[in-house]
Amino acid sequence: MEEQPNGYVSELESELIQLLEVVVLPEESEIHEQCIYKVPQLIRQNNPQAYTPRFISIGPFHSPHGSIIDNNNLYEMEELKLKYLKGFLNRTNLSVNDLVFKVQEWENKIRNCYAGLVSFDSKDFLKIIIVDACFIIEHFLRYISYKDWMETDPILLQSWLLDEIEHDLILVENQLPFFVLEEIYKLANINLELPSFITITVNYFHGLNLQNINPERLCPKHFTDLIRIFLLPSSFDCVKEEFGNIIGHVYSVSQLSEAGLVFEVTESECLLDWKFDKGVFKIPCLEIDDSTETYMRNIMAFEECHYPYQDSAYISQYFTILDYLINTEKDVSILTDKKIIVNLMGDANEVATMVNNLCKNISMPRFNSKYVSLCHGLNGFYENPRNKYKAIFVHEYFNTPWKIASTITAVLLVLFTLIQAVCSIWSLVK
């Protein structure tokens, strides 16, 4: 390779120095504050719609301000946000100056919560945060006073739109830091007349709070984190050990069933409360509908980004094991018959496909010790010689209606032949 002229080298050196002058390395504290992420492309490509707001953008990642977004719904909702902002100011007697002054103090802290490029300047960024935060607070306040607003509020008037707003508010890319909402709520002194903002928030998402977790002890980072917290048990054995590939394989529901394992549904409202003892596998009920995939994908994407060592990726652990257990629609049908899965999607094959696709391109989590013990127990049950040969026998001779019919026919034929032989011998002897 020919040497470049010295002038070229000097020019390159000067250009690199200028570029590096504007580069600011993040401090460790700033990295720890990150909690709102853009979903990695490798995960997003499995189902882009599951991570993209359909009707309302919250925060800078999907804001239509200063960007080209091919979604008229997001633009139309911007006007509605301003109406809610005005309603919030009228309700609280706060001034725009009060909001701007206070939120400006938190700007760096808010920016540090976003892991990814936020290209808006200070003015536009603060405008997005203020408008979106006040919209959410006012929307939640109207929801908690539903009877007073049900005939006048443009969102509460249309139940389908209310569902769409709730859908968009749980997306991991479509978040505001929870502390911003809480501090603005406190600034308005609304908490003197109404419950705390976390209580109002939990009331809004009550349909997802199956365990009826007490809101006053919750400290979510944002709404996606809150929905994840709803799924976690109040106490969980968080032993952090590197288990590597110990759980490399778990037998499917149909295989375990053929081996004689009994599946039972438990009354526990916590999805993670799986128990296996003496050939009985007790599993909490999992209700699956059209929105389940979106909720779970966003929670798992949050875990993937926020827990890089996967120690606390409990929902990812849950669905990884469920992915092992469910391979076909037959596995889903068995769990549905046992009331362990409530299939509101109708098609068992569609449920199996959803479960199998949820973990695609998600890092293999490091499993909690309870799950490791559970999976070893299930595998040990199947691999017990007596159970294993029973499973092989059931699979070979009783796996389908045709096999059952042919097996019974063969058994009857042998039985009749035996009876005929005995009768013939008996007649000869007599």
Image (cartoon, helix red, strand yellow):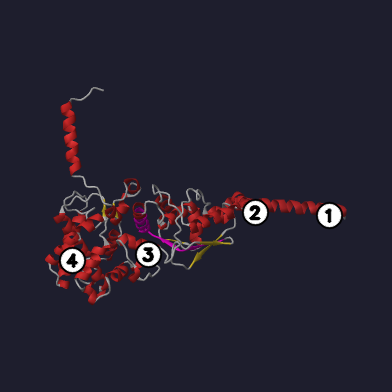
Q: Nearer the viewer, mark 3 or mark 4?
A: 3
Coordinates of residue 268 in the picture (x, y in percent): 46, 67
Residue bearing the label numbered 3: 230
Under circle 4, the secondary element is helix
Q: Amino acid at mark 1?
A: Trp
Q: Which residues are magenta?
A: 280-301
Q: Which residue corresponds to the image point at 35% horizontal and 67% vertical from the top-left?
A: 207
Whether residue 288 appears in magenta in the rendering, the answer is yes
Viewer-nearest residue: 107 or 293 = 107
Under circle 2, the secondary element is helix
Q: Check the picture and name the quadrant holding the C terminus.
A: bottom right
Q: CA separation, marks 4 and 2?
A: 67 Å
Q: Do labels 2 and 3 touch, CB within 8 Å?
A: no
Whether residue 219 appears in magenta in the rendering, the answer is no
**Can see residue 53?**
no
Under circle 3, the secondary element is helix
